[in-house]
Image (spheres, rainbow, N blue to C red):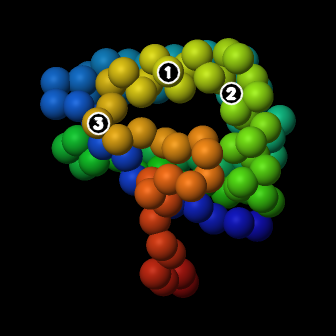
């Protein structure tokens, strides 16, 4: 099982809207996340900094699959409007965090 950490950042003033979106994630987006093999996705926020923890078998494959879904990409575009730095679906972005330690 692969574990991935991501770091993104919300635009100042967009914190409430970001949280509102995530209290009501679109069902099709949830379906595509699961279909892509992501078994756990947790988001934490500290001020404007957002930390994502993801578990799946193959993160690069999962992201590539999600990127093919128009509804998921519409969701990502709406979220991106709230973000200073957002998740990069190219697989080449700097949003991934290095895992330092695990118990």
Q: Secondary structure at mark 2?
A: helix
Mark-to-mark CA distance, 3 and 2: 24 Å
- Is 62 positioned to the left or the right of 87 in the image? right
Query: Residue at the location (75% across, 23% down)?
Result: 69
Q: Provide the residue designation for mark 1.
A: 77
Mark-to-mark CA distance, 2 and 1: 16 Å
User: Which marked residue is nearer to the observer: mark 3 or mark 2?
Assistant: 3
Q: Secondary structure at mark 3?
A: strand
Q: Is residue 80 above or below residue 4?
A: above
Looking at the image, is mark 3 or mark 2 earlier in the sequence?
A: 2
Q: Considering the image in quadrants, where does the C terminus appear? A: bottom right
- Residue 49: x and y, percent? 28, 47
Q: Provide the residue designation for mark 2.
A: 30
Query: Residue at the location (36% across, 21% down)?
Result: 81
- Is 97 positioned to the left or the right of 57 in the image? left
- Residue 64: x and y, percent? 74, 42
């Amino acid at each position: 099982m692969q574990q991935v950490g991501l770091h993104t950042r919300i635009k100042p003033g967009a914190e409430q809207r970001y949280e509102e979106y995530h209290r009501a994630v679109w069902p099709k987006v949830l379906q595509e996340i699961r279909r892509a093999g992501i078994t756990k996705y947790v988001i934490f926020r500290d001020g404007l900094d957002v930390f994502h923890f993801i578990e799946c078998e193959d993160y690069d494959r999962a992201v590539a699959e999600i990127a093919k879904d128009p509804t998921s990409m519409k969701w990502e575009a709406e979220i991106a409007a709230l973000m200073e730095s957002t998740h990069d679906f190219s697989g080449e972005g700097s949003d991934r965090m290095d895992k330092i330690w695990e118990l």
